[in-house]
Amino acid sequence: MTQLDWAIIAVYLLAVVGLGVAAGFLQRKGATGGEGGHYFLAGNTLGWPVIGLAMFAANISTVHLVSLAEAAYKFGLVFGNFEWMAGFTLVLLSLFFAPLYLRSKVATLPDFLERRFNRGCRDVLSIVSLFSAIVIHMGVALYTAAWVLRGILGLAPGATILGIDALMLFIIVLGVLTGIYTMVGGLLAVVWTESVQTVLLLVGAVVITTVGYIKIGGWSALAQTLATHPHPLAAVPGSNVTWGTANFLHMARPPSDPSGLVWYSMLLGYPVLGIWYWCCDQTIVQRVLAAKDERHARLGPLFCAFLKIWPVFFFVLPGVICVALVQKNAFGGAAPQTAADAYTFMVTHLLPVGLKGLVAAAMLAAAMQTCSAALNSTATLVAYDLFKRHNPAISDHRLVRIGKITTVAGTILAIVCSPIFGHYTTIFEGINKLISYVAPPITCVFLLGVFWKRASGKSALITLLAGMLLGFITFYLDWNNIYRGDFMLIAFLLFVACVVIMVATTFLFPEPLKAEARILVWEDWREPLRGEAGGHGLGNYRVLTVVVLVVFAVLYVIFR
C-alpha cells in the first residue's frame, strides 16, 4: 500500500460520512408522513430499484468479501449456497410476505406480529431483532472490517497500536464513523450511502476476480490446478489439513465433506435461516416497509434475487482462485497468513497502486453500510416498539431524538460484542451458527401466522419462548465444545420442534382470529398470486418470479 492508496481510503471514508450527513439535512423538509416517517422509513418513497439494491447492500458487506473468501480458501464454492438459496427465499418475500407487510402499514415487524397475535409476541421479537441488529449484523461487520485493516497494514494477529489491541482500535474507529452519519441522516442516509458503496464494492470485486482469473489461466487451468495440487494449508505446521481441493468447484457436497455443509442439510436447514433473515428480519425488510406501493415492494426483492447471483463469482470464487495461485507459486512463495486474509492478500498482491486503495476503501465502507442499516433498524425498533407503543401521543421530533440516542448506544454495544466472532473456525460459520440458533422459532411463527388462521396468540408466544430457550441451550453446548453437530441440520430440527410446539399449543389454547388480523392471513396460498400483477414483461412480478426460479435452477444444475 502506497501513500496514494491511503489517501484514497481517507478521502473515500470522509466522503461517505459527508454524504450521510448531507442526506440528514435534505430529508428534514417535505417529508411524507412527518419527521419520524421520513427519518425511519424515508417517507415511503422507495422504488423497486432502490429497494433491491439497498437490501442487497444491507446484506453484502466486508463480511462477505472476507468471510466468503476465507471459507472458499478452505472449502471451495460450497458456502456459495448461502447466496444462491437466498434467491428462493426472496421469492417468498415478494409473493407472500411483502403484500401483507404493506397492507398492515407497520413500521416494524414486531408491530406486525402484535397485530397478528399479541403484545407478548411483539416484545419477544423486538428483543431478538435488537440482538440480531447489534450482534449479527453490526458486530460481525465491524470485526471483519477491522480484520481487513489489520491485513492491509500487514499486522500479525494480536498486534497492538499505542498499547491497544489493533483489531479493537479499528473496530472503535469504524463504529464511531458509522454512528455519526447514521444518527444524523436516518434511513435516507443509509440507502444513499448503500447505493454508492455497493456499486464501488461490486466494481472492486469484479476487478479482483477478473485479474485473478486471467492470472490463473481460465476455468480449465483453475480446475486442473485444484485437482492436482495439495491444499496450501497442508504445508502450515499444526494446521492438520488432510483434505484436498479436487471438489472445490462443486456446490453439493457428500456427508464426508470437511466443510460440514452436506447437500441435504443445506436443503433442509437453509430455508429456516433464509426465511427469518430475508422475510422476517427488521434490518433487511425495513426497505420493503418503505416502498411506494405493493408493486415496488414485490419487485424490489426479486431484483435483489438477481443481484444474489453474482456473489458466488465475485466474493466466493476469489478465495478459490487464491488457493490455485498459491498452489502454482504465483506469488513467489508468499501466501495468506491465515484463510481469513485470503481476500486482502489478493487485493494487495494483484492490484496496481491506486486501485488497491479504492478497493480497500470500498471494503471498509461496505462494513459501514451494514452497520448503518442495522443501526437505523435498531433505532426504529426502540422508538416505535418501546416508546411509541407505550405513549402513542409522543411527537415525531422526540421519536427521532430517541432514535439518535439509540444509534449511539447501539454503536457502543456493537463495538463491545464484535470480538465474539473470533471464537469460530471461520467468520461466516460464526454468523450462520448464531442465526441457526435464533431463526427457527421466528420462521415457524411467521409461516404459520400468515398461512394458518387457527394459529393462536398464546401458541405463538409459547413457541417463541420455548424456541429461544432451545436455541440458547444449543448455543451453550456448541460454544463450550460439549456438542458440535451439523448446525444446518440442527436448525431444521429446532424448526420442526417449534412447529410441533405451536400446533399442539394452538389446539390446547385455541383463540378466535382477531378482526384486525384477518387481512394479515392468506385464505389460500394461491391468493397472493391472483392479485393485480402490474407492469409488463419483467415489470410483472409473476413473470419475474418465474425467470428468477429458472435462472437459479440452471445454476444449480451447472455447479451441482
Image (tube, helix red, strand yellow):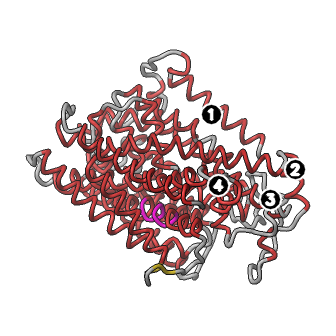
Image coordinates of residue 50 in percent, x first then y, are 43, 34
Magenta part mainly helix, strand or loop?
Answer: helix
Indicate which disc residue 325 carries: 3
Q: Judging from the image, what secondary structure is the residue with disc 2 in?
A: helix
| Label 4 to label 3: alpha-carbon separation | 29 Å
Q: What's the residue at 55%, 38% (across, down)? A: 305
In primary-sequence order, the first of circles 2 and 1 is: 2
Question: How busy is the neighbourhood of tag 1: few (under 14 within 10 Å), some, or many (20 plus)?
Answer: some
Q: Amino acid at mark 2?
A: Ala
Closer-to-camera residue (352/477): 352
Image coordinates of residue 302 in percent, x first then y, are 52, 33
| Label 2 to label 3: alpha-carbon separation | 10 Å
| Label 1 to label 3: alpha-carbon separation | 34 Å
In primary-sequence order, the first of circles 1 and 4 is: 4
Q: Amino acid at mark 1?
A: Leu
Q: What's the residue at 36%, 57% (across, down)? A: 178
Instruction: Specify the segment rendered in magenta.
Output: 138-144
